[in-house]
Amino acid sequence: QSVLAQPPSVSGAPGQGVTISCTGSSSNIGAGYDVHWYQHLPGTAPRLLIYGNVKRPSGVPDRFSGSKSGTSASLAITGLQAEDEAIYCCQSYDGSVSSWVFGGGTKLTVL
Amino acid sequence: QVQLQESGPGLVKPSETLSLTCRVSGYSISSGHYWGWIRQPPGKALEWIGVIYHTAVTHYNPSLKSRVTISVDTSKNQFSLRLSSVTAADTAVYYCARVDCTNNSCYGDNWGRGALVTVSS
């Protein structure tokens, strides 16, 4: 069981939007540690999508946005495209175990 | 554009030592940044293993610290992972990554494609 909880799957039609949640606790997200998001396709290198809760690396479309509140964070994807079909994973730091912690990943299906 | 490539044996026997190398191109390790290893066992979440700075300062996951050594070779622009006394639970895809940090949390900003390591006799 992952330290950060994510829904196993979400889906949406092309052009629509989805939101993926990442729920932590008082020792990680709730303690104020920043949240980062990755996009991952098996067999490929994970791609950083969001860092520092809300910041996008250069080259990441503004269709991807991050937010954080309390012990949770969210990744929003608007204007879904077929190429967005992937696994999305959140990551933060946990002070109680002095380690990076990850969510279990959410598989996005574009219908 | 920085690129990372993992290499090493795909099969390791139980109780032996797993060794992987990450070759970095398009960026000099000596220029800065931490460099890290992360793994993903089959069907499970990603797990942070540890990071190293070009000065050889290291930080390890406490749950793996007794078995992990990460080293850096700036002359070859690569860094390496050694994990001793492996068991089947260490079977995973191992990723290397360049690491950046906000003021309170670090993350991988560029990753390799990963190397599958299976622990089996």
Image (tube, rainbow, N blue to C red):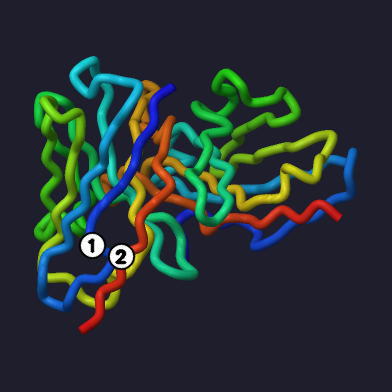
As measured in the structure, the alpha-carbon distance from the residue carrying label 2 to the one carrying label 1 is 7 Å
Q: Closer to the camera: disc 2 or disc 1?
A: 1
- Could you say whether the residue bearing mark 1 is in a helix, strand or loop? loop
On the rendered structure, is A22 left or right of B76?
right
Of helix, strand and loop, which one carries label 2? strand
Q: Is there CB contact under 8 Å for labels 2 and 1?
A: yes
Tell me which chain the residue with mark 1 is part of: B
- Quarter of the figure with residue A38: top right
Which one is in front, B46 or B110?
B110
Q: Earlier in the sequence, mark 2 or mark 1?
A: 1
Q: Quadrant of residue B22?
A: top left
The residue at which mark 2 appears reads as B117
Relative to A79, is B54 above or below?
above
Residue at 28% from the left image edge and 65% from the top image edge: B10
* Quadrant of the rendered image containing residue A6: bottom right
Q: Measuring 63% from the left and 26% from the top, which residue is drawn there?
A: A60
Mark 1, residue position: B9
